[in-house]
Amino acid sequence: MFTYTANPARVVFGSGTLAVVPDELQRLGASRVLLVAGKSAAEAADRTADALGPLLAARFGEPTMHTPVEVTERALALVVEHSVDCVVAIGGGSATGLAKALALRTDIPQVIVPTTYAGSEMTPVVGQTENGRKTTQSSPKVLPEVVVYDVDLTLGLPVPTSLASGVNAMAHAVEALYSAEANPIVDQLALAAIRLLAAALPRIAADPSDADARTDALRAAWLAGSCLGSVGMGLHHKLCHTLGGSFGLPHAETHTIVLPHAMAYNAPNAREAMRRIAEALGAPDAPTAVFDLLASLPVPRSLAEIGLAEGDLAKAAELATAAPYPNPRELTRDGIEELLRHAWSGTRPVPAEGTPPDLRRLTQEVVDSFAGTPDPRLRELLSELVRTLHSYVVRTDLTQEEWEYAIGFLTRTGQISSDTRQEFILLSDTLGVSSVVDVLTNSRTPDTTPSAVLGPFYVEGPPETEQGADLAEGLPGTPLWTDVQVTEPDGTPVPDAVVDVWQSNEDGFYDVQLPDLDGPVLRARFRTDAEGRLRFWTIVPSAYPIPDDGPVGQMLTAVERHPFRAPHVHFMIAKPGYRTLVTQLFVRGGDYLDSDTVFGVKDGLIVDFAERTGPAPDGREPWRRLEFTFRVTRA
Ligand code: NAD
């Protein structure tokens, strides 16, 4: 069971959205607006004031960090004096905090235009400072009615503030994942926020005017703020609160320094959350990944750097553990003091036991080695192959012995291959790769016949054969009269198409597998007539095992998979100006349709090989009849 409360704010997100504020006020029915904005948002506030015209009742220009009550009271006087019925706040957490403090006292609706990534606009919580003490309270009155995210307003946010409030947002998301109230909805918001921030913050540090990175960071701020508004936070937030409140450390920088160390402290008791965070960051271990991310950014790394005295660590630990609160790991004084000592000196957390080594740099080096490849597609294919292979080796913790076995396996796969035996195609087929490539390449149009893999038994240039001939002359098996047509998707016949047909004999063998056989058997090349039709005799195909006396067979044995293919006839239909169709028709009711060893069966290719009563025209009985229309498209 879980509980999730969606906070009912209306959100407008985009570039240039500041312009919608008057419309949003109209929706709310507001007529006397208080505009709150500090110096950093003065220009945006001036524009908004102009746009509001007579709706603007008053302005307040000094929102203050941590929402001191005396500042709120000055703004409240304006609310009363001007009969204000709505507040618009443009700025960071400080401007939002003031709007919330006013709403707490008057319940006036709020339109918030955030310009940092702190996320306060998404929470029903207000923190206020009185006589130097900050307290928080939660009330539905405090939750803003409308949030207008305008990416343009964040382009000028200085890099240090951007990074500090971005990491603040990441902390909301991280702690949401191991919160006592964690739930699957908030988890998704949190993971998306972490992913977006990890990618956006380095880009913002490199180029603060990168509008795409700013968009991602602001989206992440929204998501992370929603996490903060939905579930309770833990150790990290409390610790930052204590350090900020009792030792006068700068709020934002404290967050940035403490986060990886708080994560490392909680990691042993929040393994699943850490695993998911690590995965979102593409790293083996979450706390060190966050530490490394921050180490790559121009932000302070140690509490010593921002002025905490070493002698204060014990006192800080005592304060931080004085009142119990929900946290995945028990808060012990010694444990917290040790955590703080790490944060104080800025040392990299030790990865959790059993964490695989971080090989991202090695992978990147190999990928970088392809940077000069002139063919961009070749560069992409090789880079992605290396990333995937490295990741596979890491994720499976591949041993030297297993690697050697794989090399030996591939060597044997090559050695057994010849002109008539293609073990690599078999390997690709039995791993489903051929079918994946086939679907991507050939089956993107729903109104044409689905394609199927070519398979290893196609031989170029089968003998040209007259319509009506019998491919199976003299072979045992149930006679099959095949009457098919090739048309375009709208039914227009396709005459003169070259149709290659090949299939197995009654024992399940193709001619190329029978060295004593002289010449092509059960394979032919036809041409469709003026109506796109093609008729010939053959025999009903049987299920057959793929050649399983090689490495692929050993693999199937090892995994206890059978080597059988469902019974089918192959067709390749080609005509200049048309897309060549390579496909197979499967016998409805045949064996192995649901466990075809090369994953080649598609619903649209299972067809009736209808049993007929009475003798065939040439007197044989019983016999069967196959009718099918192949739909091909122009190239
Ligand atoms: P802030 O609003 O004080 O902004 C930080 C600094 O950045 C300020 O100097 C501000 O003038 C400047 N700034 C803001 N936007 C700018 C822009 N676009 N361009 C240039 N400069 C800009 O602080 P913050 O980091 O946004 O938020 C922190 C505050 O929010 C703290 O008081 C914190 O407690 C509170 N907060 C509350 C909640 C909650 O749920 N109640 C959640 C998160 C944060």
Image: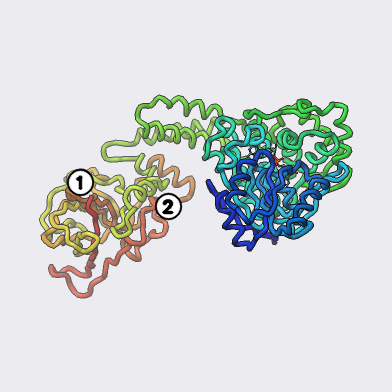
The crowd level at tag 1 (other Cα within 10 Å; few <14, some 14-19, many 20+) is few
Secondary structure state at the residue bearing disc 2: loop
Q: Mark 2: which amino acid? A: His
| Image-quadrant location for residue 161 | top right
Does the beta carbon at disc 2 come under 8 Å from ligand 1?
no
Instruction: Choose mark 1 or mark 2, whichever is in front.
Output: 2
Q: Position of residue 114 (x, y in %)?
A: 64, 46
Residue 406, numbered label: none
The residue lying at 66 percent from left, 52 percent from top is: 88
Which sits in the foreground, 126 or 457?
Answer: 126
First in sequence: mark 1 or mark 2? Answer: 1
Residue 432 x, y percent position in the rendering: 41, 48
User: Label 1: which residue?
Assistant: 517
Task: Name the image quarter holding residue 124.
Answer: bottom right
Is residue 403 or residue 102 the one in the foreground? 102
Q: Is residue 27 above or below residue 425?
A: below
Q: How many residues crowd mark 2 within 10 Å: few (<14), some (14–19), many (20+)? A: some
Q: Which residue is mark 2?
A: 562
- Taking the image in four quarters, ligand 1 sits in the one at top right
Image coords of residue 633 (percent x, y) = 24, 55
Question: What's under tag 1, amino acid-wise?
Answer: Leu
Residue 93 left/right relative to 525: right
Q: Give the structural element (helix, strand or loop) at label 1.
A: loop
Report if residue 140 is visible in the image. no
Q: Residue at x 29, y 55 (%)?
A: 584
In this view, 176 is above or below 205: below
Q: Assess whether mark 2 and mark 1 are in contact (beta carbons under 8 angstroms).
A: no
User: How far apart are labels 1 and 2 at the CA level?
Assistant: 27 Å
Residue 232, horizontal then vertical, whole percent: 75, 51
- Of all residues, the one furthest to the bottom in this rendering is 614
Residue 110 visible? The answer is yes
